[in-house]
Image: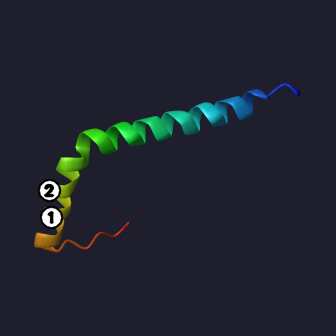
């Protein structure tokens, strides 16, 4: 089995961290996000990213 390069390991760790943080934020902020989206629809804000 070939040894993993540090950059590859860093990438895996980064992706894992991002996915975990995303899952946590979705779980904890689901209710708030729904309210937020309702408010945006009400005020009809055009987002320009």
Identify which residue, 13 or 27, lies in the foreground.
Answer: 27
Whole-angstrom CA distance, mark 1 to mark 2, is: 5 Å
- Left or right, residue 45 beside residue 16: left
Q: Position of residue 36 (x, y in %)?
A: 17, 57
Q: Where is residue 20 in the image (x, y as percent from the top left)?
A: 45, 35
SS category of the residue bearing label 1:
helix
Q: How is the image coloured?
A: rainbow
Q: Name the residue under label 2.
A: 35
Figure check: 9 above or below 28 = above
Figure check: 37 above or below 7 = below
Q: Which residue is drawn at 32% across and 40% down?
A: 25
- Left or right, residue 7 beside residue 22: right
Q: Quadrant of residue 7?
A: top right
- Left or right, residue 48 beside residue 41: right
Which numbered disc covers residue 38? 1
Q: Quadrant of residue 26?
A: top left
Q: Position of residue 21 (x, y in %)?
A: 41, 36
- Left or right, residue 3 beside residue 20: right
Please report contact status of discs 1 and 2: CB closer than 8 Å, yes or no: yes
SS category of the residue bearing label 2:
helix
Q: Quadrant of residue 14?
A: top right
Q: Residue at x 50, y 33 (%)?
A: 17
């Amino acid at each position: 089995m070939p040894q993993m390069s540090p950059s590859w390991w860093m990438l895996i760790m980064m992706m894992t961290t991002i996915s975990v943080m995303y899952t946590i934020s979705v779980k904890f902020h689901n209710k708030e996000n729904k309210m937020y989206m309702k408010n945006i629809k009400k005020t009809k804000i055009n987002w320009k990213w």
